[in-house]
Image (spheres, rainbow, N blue to C red):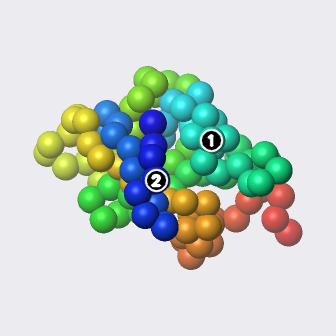
Amino acid sequence: MFEQFSSGYYLGVLYVEPGEERAALNVDDHEAVNRQLYADSEGIERLDSPLVMKLDGIHFPVRGDEGVPSGTLTVPASLADGDLPARREVFLARPERAGQLLKYGGWRPADAA
């Protein structure tokens, strides 16, 4: 689904369509990407942590959602332009970059004190 693009991002092509107020991928796709690309050297990944994607220069967290079809990324109406729905190139932040972006955006894991 995604391949290495640069030191900070992977690149993939997904069907992008307007959705609810939060960006989402199919829950199985979300877990598969998380396991494949975000697992550490010991194979441990945080499935409760959102993926961080970039579309048209805007970063946003992406959660898993059972109601989203496989291979589809839904984005909030504020990110949807007149060209959607369509197949689009989407950037996925590499783990280190994703952590920085989430931290700067104020996201904290549920078990953080």
Say which mark, if any, is on residue 104. none
* Residue wearing tag 1: 36
Q: Residue at x 63, y 36 (%)?
A: 31
Position in image of residue 74 (x %, y %): 38, 39
Residue 63 figure quarter: top right
Q: Is 87 placed above or below 50 here? A: above
Q: Is 101 placed above or below 23 here? A: below
Please tell me which of labels 2 and 1 falls first in the chain: 2
Q: Is residue 73 left or right of residue 65?
A: left
Q: Quadrant of the C terminus?
A: bottom right
Position in image of residue 56 (x %, y %): 27, 59
Task: State the residue in front, 112 or 21.
Answer: 112
* Residue wearing tag 2: 4
Q: Residue at x 62, y 41 (%)?
A: 36
Tell me the CA gap for discs 2 and 1: 12 Å
Q: Nearer the viewer, mark 2 or mark 1?
A: 2
Judged from the image, the secondary structure of the residue bearing numbered disc 1 is helix
Q: Amino acid at mark 1?
A: Gln
Position in image of residue 88 (x %, y %): 26, 42
| Mark 1 closeness class: few <14, some 14–19, many ≥20 residues within 10 Å | few
The residue sitting at the left extreme is 82
Judged from the image, the secondary structure of the residue bearing numbered disc 2 is strand
Question: Does residue 27 appear anywhere in the picture?
Answer: no
Q: Quadrant of the N terminus?
A: top left
Q: Residue at x 19, y 49 (%)?
A: 81
